[in-house]
Each structure stands twice: as C-alpha cells, then as structure tokens.
C-alpha cells in the first residue's frame, strides 16, 4: 500500500464512482484530500465521512481552477497530487442528433473531459512548482478504453478521452524537460460500475451484462480497483513513471482490441 502521509491531493468528480473510491483510497493511504464535484450533497457527504475537504466545482470553468488549487494550498500548505477524474458522456454518434443538439453536446463534453483536464494540469503545475522543499508533484488523468476502441454511439466521449491520453504525454514531457519533478500519467479504466455506466444502462437495458462479458474476468471492475492504480501513480513508489499509461480493464483490450 503506498504511503501518502504528508501529501495533499485534489480529486475532481469525487461524488461517486472512481472519484469517490479515489478519495477514500488516498485518505486511507494518509493523504489530505480536497474533493470537488458539481453534486454538492453527495460530494460533501463523502468528504465528511472520510475527513476530506470539499468544494463545488465545474471543471470546465477556467476561472475557478486557480481558486480550487489555492483552497488546497491554503488548507494544507502545498499540493502534491491532482487526479483529473471528472467526466461526462454525450450519448450520441456522429449522425444521431440534429446539428443544434449534437454541437451543444460535443462542446460540453470536450469542455469537461478535455479542457477541464488541461486547465487542471496547468493550475496544479503552477502550485506544485512552488511546493515547500522544491518543485514536485504527480498528476493522474483518467481516460477510458474508449480512447483505444472508440464507441460509435458516443463520438464526443471517445474523442475527448483519446485526447486526454495525448495531453498527458505532452504535460509529462514538458515538465520533465524543465526538470520540474512533476510527473503526469494516465489511468485507462475498462468497464467499471460507475454512475456513467448506470446511466447508459437506462438508455440501453442489458448493456452492463453485455459489457461485463467483454472481459476475460467476466465482470465489471469495482471503482476501488481503479483507485488502487491511481494511488500507486500518485505515490513516490514510481518516480521514473511519467508519460505512462496504466490499463485497468481486466484484459478487455488484450482480447478485444477493436471492441
């Protein structure tokens, strides 16, 4: 189990699923955590339960990011970890909706999943460079297996998660070349029992059972299993890992590369 004692983390999309599991895991590993989400009731309840701070945040609001980072630094004195987990789906293929609905959904998904992640990285790096004791930090961005095998039924989600993979590598390289000691890696979850998948099940009954069968393990991942990978990448146990990707998909992509 990674030792995160003395570390300070921000976790976006903390109210449910992988985000909630990550807050629980980082707290259990010793980190101080500021969780953020648009769902104030669920986010506050989760953070109160585990002794974390909470703030309401729309990650697509660029002006809010410096305030979120400043709150963590003010509360705990530094920022060591950022987990860019907040995300959303659009639920539409390229020709499924009329122009107005399609473009609105596309813009919103890209604003949250991609731009929110980029702005978060930028704000976190600015704080991590000024950490007491010198520049240091770890950023973990959450992508999806849809970044490797895109869903024809959700062009916005697939495209945004594919872009997150490339964004992480760019951020990692930029930080490394400047000697900042700030790592950036990507976790790529497979089918995980989250609110997004539950919502998709409402639209497509039987989807969860069908998706579970795509893994040789014949089940969905529990969010805590993805959180374990996030905690490892956030820790000091992998100082040479940056610009890397960690698949947490139960070997789904090993046997279904074109799924």
Image (spheres, rainbow, N blue to C red):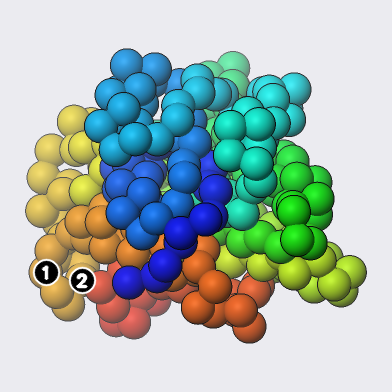
Q: Quadrant of the C terminus?
A: bottom left
- Residue ID for mark 1: 218
Image position of 175 with respect to 105: above or below: below
Q: Secondary structure at mark 1?
A: loop
Q: Position of residue 145 (x, y in %)?
A: 42, 62
Closer to the camera in the image, 121 or 214: 121
Which quarter of the rendering shows the N terminus? bottom left
Q: Residue at x 11, y 69 (%)?
A: 218
**Residue occupying the point 56% across, 24% down:** 58
The numbered dot on residue 215 is 2
Q: Is residue 32 above or below residue 99?
A: below
Q: Quadrant of residue 154?
A: top left
Residue 93 x %, y %: 46, 40
Q: Residues within 10 Å of mark 2 (few under 14, many from 20)?
A: many
Count of marks overlaid on the render: 2
Label ID, residue 121: none
Q: Is residue 168 left or right of residue 193?
A: right
Q: Residue at x 32, y 16 (%)?
A: 41
In space, the residues marked 2 and 1 are separated at their CA atoms by 5 Å
Whether residue 102 can be seen here: no
In terms of secondary structure, where does tag 2 sit? Answer: loop
x and y, in percent, of residue 109 in the image:
55, 34
Q: Are marks 2 and 1 in contact (CB under 8 Å)?
A: yes
Residue 91 visible here: yes
In the rendered image, residue 232, in percent from the top left (x then y), is placed at 43, 70
Q: Residue furthest right?
A: 178
Judge whether 89 appears above or below 63 on screen: below
């Amino acid at each position: 189990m990674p030792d995160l004692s003395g570390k300070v983390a921000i976790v976006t999309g903390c109210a449910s699923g992988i985000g909630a599991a990550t807050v629980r895991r980082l707290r259990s590993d010793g980190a101080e955590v500021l969780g953020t989400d648009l769902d104030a009731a669920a986010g506050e309840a989760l953070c109160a339960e585990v002794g974390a701070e909470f703030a309401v945040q729309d990650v697509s609001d660029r002006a809010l990011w410096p305030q979120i980072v400043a709150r963590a630094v003010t509360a705990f004195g530094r920022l060591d970890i950022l987990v860019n987990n907040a995300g959303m789906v659009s639920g539409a293929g390229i020709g499924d909706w009329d122009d107005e609905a399609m473009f609105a959904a596309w813009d919103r998904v890209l604003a949250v999943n991609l731009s929110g992640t980029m702005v978060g990285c930028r704000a976190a790096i600015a704080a991590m460079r000024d950490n007491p004791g010198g520049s240091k930090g770890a950023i973990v961005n959450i992508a999806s297996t849809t970044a490797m095998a895109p869903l024809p039924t959700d062009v916005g989600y697939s495209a945004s998660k594919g872009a997150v993979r490339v964004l992480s590598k760019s951020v990692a390289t930029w930080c490394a070349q400047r000697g900042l000691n700030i790592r950036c890696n990507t976790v790529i979850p497979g089918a995980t029992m989250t609110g997004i998948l539950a919502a998709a099940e409402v639209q497509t009954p039987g989807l969860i059972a069908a998706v579970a069968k795509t893994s040789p393990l014949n089940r969905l991942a529990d969010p805590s299993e993805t959180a374990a990978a996030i905690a490892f990448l956030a820790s000091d146990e992998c100082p040479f890992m940056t610009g890397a990707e960690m698949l947490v998909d139960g070997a789904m992509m090993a046997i279904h590369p074109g799924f």
